[in-house]
């Protein structure tokens, strides 16, 4: 969560962070977490199905 908050508060290279400067970064992290969850779940289910098919 600290990385997400740091990304949302980030500005340009020479500027100090500002509270909730880049709100679109919330959308990026929500999409990243959703796709990451689907990918991990897909891998887990794939391994289970593969093990059932081998037996």
Image (cartoon, grey):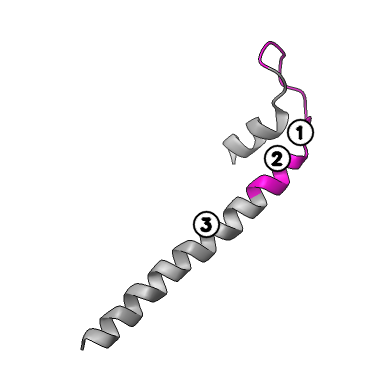
| Dot 2 and dot 1 residues touching (CB under 8 Å) | yes
Q: CA distance from mark 3 to mark 2?
A: 16 Å
Q: Above or below — where is 10 with respect to 15?
A: below
Residue 21 in magenta?
yes
**Mark 3 — residue?**
36
Give yes or no for residue 16 being in the magenta stretch: yes
In the rendered image, which quarter contains the N terminus? Answer: top right
Q: Which residues are magenta?
A: 13-29
Q: Measured from the top left, where is residue 54 in percent x and y? A: 22, 85
Percent of width and height locating residue 46 = 37, 74
Compared across the picture, whether 41 is left or right of 17 comes to left
Element type at marker 2? Answer: helix
Magenta residues: mostly which secondary structure? loop
Name the residue: 66% across, 15% down: 13
- Look at 78% across and 39% down and name the residue there: 23
Q: Which mark is residue 25?
A: 2
């Amino acid at each position: 969560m600290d990385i997400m908050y740091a990304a949302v508060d980030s500005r340009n290279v020479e500027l100090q962070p500002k509270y909730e400067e880049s709100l679109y970064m919330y959308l990026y992290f929500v999409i990243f977490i959703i796709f990451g969850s689907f990918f991990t779940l897909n891998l887990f289910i794939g391994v289970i199905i593969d093990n059932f098919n081998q037996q």
